[in-house]
Amino acid sequence: MFWTSWFLAVLAIALAWPVPIVLSRARWPARSPFTAMLLWQAIALAGGLSMIGAMLVYGLEPIGGNLLAGLGALAGMVLRNEPTTALGFWHVFALSAAALLTAHLVFTLLLTYYKIQRQRRRHRELLELLASPSADGPRTMVLNLESPVAYCLPGGARSVTVLSDGLLAALEPAELRAVLIHENAHLSQRHHLLLWAFAAWRQALPWLPTTRLAQDAVNSLIEMLADDVALKTESKSTLIRAIAIVASGSSGALAGRMAFGEDEPSGDDPGQPGATGGSGSARTTASRVSRLLSPQPPLPEPLRLVVLATCLLLLAVPTALLIVPGLLG
């Protein structure tokens, strides 16, 4: 298992640093945002699996031929109070580090979920007091705010899309339809779950620059995916005008969300994605508008299949190395 642990360690380092940097600078994700989203998820999952797996495999090397055998032997030592002399200091250290990292990741995931749910609950309670139902669509609320604001608040059957009076006054009917379709796409495609996962990853490893790159990339990709849904029924010019109008109220949107208790990301605290959608960052808005003004053809089918195959390999290789005895010697 010696070479297995080293291979997993190298893979973990590659997926934690150079690979996300290269992907964040690539231009093709805007051509196929769904494929790019799958790749980001595969990188995150494979990176975490490789990081923890490398430490586990190295720690269990003296007592098992693979991960399952090693864990079985370790469980026998613990349950039957057998001597652990076969494990050296660095093996015990690696096992302890793997256990702590796993607990940290799981705890951060759950804590992030709790914070998001608490924010959404508080947000929804204030919406019930300060907003009124809209006649423009079901599960739509109108906020008394002059700035153009649009976002959605996930919550299963209680999900709502929030618009401001300023936005309704600024938009033409077609532009309003584009905004509503865009925000509803966030809800129907469960984009808040992706935001939760990547926010938790960044919370767990804030010192890793690529967690910020991944979160920024995912935020941009979900906006592109929602734009693609809106383009099925509305024209590009209509959507561009709607994006520009909503983006013009980004400062007002920030003020509105903070008034509702939303924690916005900062350099020190990545925050929690309580609400979804809205204008996004200036960079995201610029990317969306540029993508619509200068459309590029989707990624060719052979290249898309290569990316999908890469996703499968990223998940399959670490898993196989962990459970198949003697795969790398």
Image: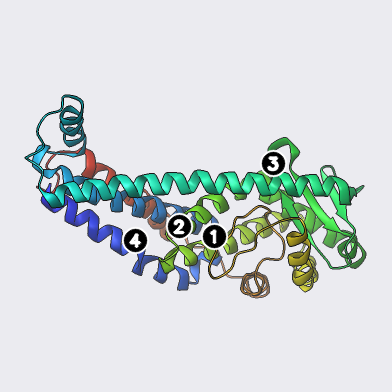
- Camera sees residue 189: no
* Label ID, residue 40: 2
Q: Residues within 10 Å of mark 1 (few under 14, many from 20)?
A: many
Residue found farthest to the left: 86
Mark found first going from the N terminus, 3 or 2: 2
Local SS, label 1: helix
Task: Name the spot of residue 72 as percent of width and height, x first.
Answer: 19, 30
Q: What whole-number distance in Å separates the C-alpha atoms at marks 1 and 3?
A: 20 Å
- Camera sees residue 283: yes
Q: Nearer the viewer, residue 329 or 83?
A: 83
Q: Is 140 left or right of 70, judged from the image as shown?
A: right
Residue found at x 34% / y 69%: 18
To which quarter of the image does residue 247 belong?
A: bottom right
Q: Nearer the viewer, residue 222 or 124?
A: 124
Residue found at x 25% / y 47%: 96
Q: Residues within 10 Å of mark 4 (few under 14, many from 20)?
A: many
Circle 1: residue type: Val
Q: Which residue is mark 3?
A: 155
Q: Residues within 10 Å of mark 3 (few under 14, many from 20)?
A: some
Q: Which residue is mark 1?
A: 218
Circle 3: residue type: Gly
